[in-house]
Image: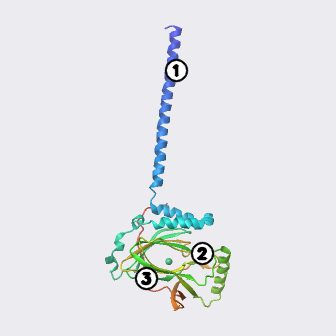
């Protein structure tokens, strides 16, 4: 073999080696590009297929996160429209709880509580009420709440303290909290007595929109199941039993209407937890929230 032949052979080998490497690289790039597209498609699919309760949960976390408190009203509106679309099946609701037979058992509690999620900022839960049972009139101290009926129908009667004493800004809340703490520290007149205006009195079925309560508006309500078992999904923030600064744990207080002042103004008197109101529990069977 001449020098020229050897050189030609070497050149061919170098060319072939580089061609092979380039081909492999091209192939790798093509596969990677294809994978990127597939991955991107999958991500988009995941966004499209997020179960409604998971997007609702994520929106609830954002709505009641102090970092976004300047956007509270916009986020509350978004959360409400997400809840408006929620159905019993989105929450994995056990349809046997909606069967009247289940509630005829003599030892059955009049209310079943299903905890969906709880942390220090939000509580998400489902309440199922026996036919004809009324969840007694109660309050939600310094809390926001959203309530969506998912099965049966309920009558909701809500009240707003009248005249409205609490303004929405934090300074007024702080002043109110100090006043409340001082009142309790005196050790007398521990039970509240107040005037309240009926802010809502309507029947809500599963196709009804979400009811909202705020620290000042419609903060007191009673909820009565009609002739069938009824279930509603609730988001509360902050949850009961979290601390209210300068007051203590956030307790749920119950009230009796002691005086009908006019057609839509009543006088409420705080009372003990009604003995008729107790719940058993059932597990949450919907998508895992994360
Ligand atoms: Fe409530």
Q: Earlier in the sequence, mark 1 or mark 2?
A: 1
Q: Residues within 10 Å of mark 2 (few under 14, many from 20)?
A: some
> SS of the residue at dot 2?
strand
Identify the residue shown where x is 50% and y is 19%. 13
The answer as to whether callout 2 falls within 8 Å of ligand 1 is no
> SS of the residue at dot 3?
strand
The count of marks equals 3
The answer for how far apart the CA atoms under marks 1 and 2 are is: 76 Å
Mark number for residue 243?
2
Identify the residue shown where x is 60% and y is 75%. 243
Q: Earlier in the sequence, mark 2 or mark 3?
A: 3
Q: Quadrant of residue 197?
A: bottom right
Identify the residue shown where x is 50% and y is 17%. 12
The answer for how far apart the CA atoms under marks 3 and 1 are is: 87 Å
- Is disc 3 in contact with disc 1, using a CB cutoff of under 8 Å? no
Residue 166 is situated, as x and y percent measured from the top left of the image, at 63, 79
Q: Which residue is mark 1?
A: 14
Residue 289 seen anywhere in this rendered image of the structure: no
Mark number for residue 134?
3
Q: Residues within 10 Å of mark 1 (few under 14, many from 20)?
A: few
Q: Earlier in the sequence, mark 3 or mark 1?
A: 1
Mark number for residue 278?
none
Q: Residues within 10 Å of mark 3 (few under 14, many from 20)?
A: many
Name the residue nearer the viewer: 145 or 81: 81
Identify the residue shown where x is 54% and y is 64%. 61
- Picture layout, residue 35 above or below residue 219: above
Closer to the eye: label 3 or 1: 3
Residue 173 is situated, as x and y percent measured from the top left of the image, at 65, 77
> SS of the residue at dot 1?
helix
Name the residue nearer the viewer: 80 or 134: 80
Q: How is the image coloured?
A: rainbow
């Amino acid at each position: 073999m001449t020098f020229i032949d050897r050189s030609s052979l070497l050149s061919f080998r170098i060319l072939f080696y580089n061609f092979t490497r380039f081909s492999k690289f091209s192939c790798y790039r093509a596969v990677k590009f294809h994978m990127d597209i597939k991955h991107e498609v999958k991500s988009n699919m995941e966004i499209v297929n997020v179960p409604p309760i998971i997007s609702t949960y994520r929106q609830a976390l954002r709505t009641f996160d102090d970092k976004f408190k300047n956007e509270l009203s916009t986020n509350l509106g978004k959360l409400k429209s997400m809840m408006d679309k929620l159905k019993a099946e989105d929450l994995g609701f056990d349809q046997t709880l909606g069967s009247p037979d289940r509630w005829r058992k003599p030892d059955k509690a009049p209310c079943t509580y299903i905890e969906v999620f709880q942390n220090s900022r939000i509580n998400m839960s489902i309440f199922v009420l026996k036919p004809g049972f009324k969840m007694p009139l109660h309050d939600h101290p310094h809390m926001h709440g959203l309530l969506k009926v998912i099965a049966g129908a309920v009558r909701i009667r809500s009240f707003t303290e009248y005249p409205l004493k609490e303004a929405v800004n934090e300074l007024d809340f702080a002043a109110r909290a100090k006043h409340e703490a001082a009142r309790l520290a005196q050790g007398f007149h521990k039970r509240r007595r107040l005037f309240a205006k009926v802010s809502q009195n309507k029947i809500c079925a599963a196709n009804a929109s979400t009811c909202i309560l705020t620290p000042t508006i419609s903060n007191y309500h009673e909820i009565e199941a009609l002739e069938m078992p009824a279930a509603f999904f609730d988001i509360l923030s902050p949850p009961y039993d979290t601390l209210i600064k300068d007051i203590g744990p956030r307790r749920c207080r119950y009230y009796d209407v002691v005086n009908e002042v006019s057609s839509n103004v009543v006088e409420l008197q705080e009372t003990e937890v009604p003995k008729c109101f107790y719940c058993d529990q059932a597990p949450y069977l919907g998508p895992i929230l994360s």
